[in-house]
Amino acid sequence: MRIFRKSDDLMEFLRLNHVDGLKLGFVPTMGALHAGHISLVSRSMEQNELTICSIFVNPTQFNNPEDLAKYPVTIEKDIDMLEASGCQLLFLPDPSQIYPAGYQARHYDLGYLETILEGKYRPGHFQGVCQVVDRLLSIVNPDILYLGRKDYQQCMVIARMLTLTGRNITLDFVETMREPNGLAMSSRNVRLNESDRVRAIQIYRSLQWLKKNVKPGNLSPLKAEAVQQLTDHGFEVDYVEIASAESLSITEVWDGREPLVALAAAFCGPVRLIDNVTIS
Ligand code: PAF
C-alpha cells in the first residue's frame, strides 16, 4: 500500500494514474479502523480498480473539544488492517494539508437537515463534515464515495453537499456492521469499559423494539417508551426519533406506508453512541 502525506503528491499520482482510465473508489475515515471500515474498503475494491482510504481526525467537525481530545488514534494498527485488506492507497494528511494557509471555510446550506437530530445536538458538526469531505474530494476526485449507513444523517448531508457543489461523484451507502450481539461497530466502542460494552447493546435492542412495534398513527408514545427503556438501562438519551427514511423529516403520525428510519443517540457512560434501523 502506498501512503501519501502531502496533497500535492497524491494529486500528482492520481492524475498520472487516471490517465490510464482507472476507476477510483474512496473511503474517508477518521481512523481507529474496525471491520465496518474494512467492509467499505472491500466493497470499493470489488467495484473499482483503485481504492484509496483517508485517515484524518477532522477538528472542525468536533463541537466538543473534549470529544476531539479523546478520539481514539491507532495509526499503526489501522495501516496493518488496510494492508491486510489489500487497499492500494492511503492518504494520511496533517491539518496543514487539509486546511492550508488561506483556506476559506465555506458555508453549506444544509437547511432542515442541519437543525434536527445530530445537527441539533452537535451544532456546527455537519458544516465541519462538509468542509473536510469537500476538501478531500477536491484532492482525491474519486468516481465512487463510500460511506457507512451507521451515520445515516451524515450520508444525507453529504448527498446534499454533492448537489450544492455540483460534484459528479456516485455515492454508495454501505450497511452497518454489527458485533454478534447487535452492537453497531464504531471507533468510539474502544472507549467503552467492559460493562458499558454489554449495556450498549440496548440501543440496538430499543431500535429493534421500535421496528417491531411501530403501527400507523401517533408515534409519540412509542418513542417515549424507547427513551424510557434506555433511561432505565442508565443511558443519558439525546434523542430517539422516527423519521422519513427518504427526507429524514421527523414522523409524528405514520400513514403506515412511508418507509421510516428509527434513530437514537445516547451516552453510555462517557461515550456518545448513535445507531439507526430502517423500517419499511
Ligand atoms: O464518518 C466519519 O468518519 C467522518 O465524519 C468523515 C466522513 C470521515 C469525515 O471526517
Image: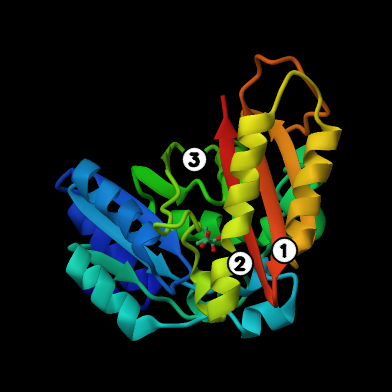
Is the residue under label 2 in contact with that under label 1 (CB below 8 Å)? yes
Q: Which structural element holds mark 3?
A: loop
Callout 2 amino acid: Arg
Callout 1 amino acid: His
Q: Which structural element holds mark 2?
A: helix
Residue 213, given in percent of the width and then of the height, sits at 67, 31
Q: Which structural element holds mark 1?
A: loop
Residue 206, given in percent of the width and then of the height, sits at 65, 47
Numbered disc total: 3
Q: CA distance from mark 1 to mark 2?
A: 7 Å
In the picture, which quadrant includes the N terminus?
bottom left
Instruction: Please give the residue where the numbered disc 3 appears in the rendered image.
Output: 167
Q: Quadrant of residue 67?
A: bottom right
Considering depth in this image, is 14 or 236 the residue closer to the camera?
236
Instruction: Please give the residue where the numbered disc 2 appears in the rendered image.
Output: 199
Mark sitting earlier along the chain (3/2): 3
In this view of the protein, can residue 96 be seen by the observer? Answer: yes
Q: CA distance from mark 3 to mark 2?
A: 41 Å
Left or right, 78 with respect to 258, comes to left
Left or right, 121 with respect to 193, comes to right
* 3 vs 1, front mark: 1
Mark sitting earlier along the chain (3/1): 3
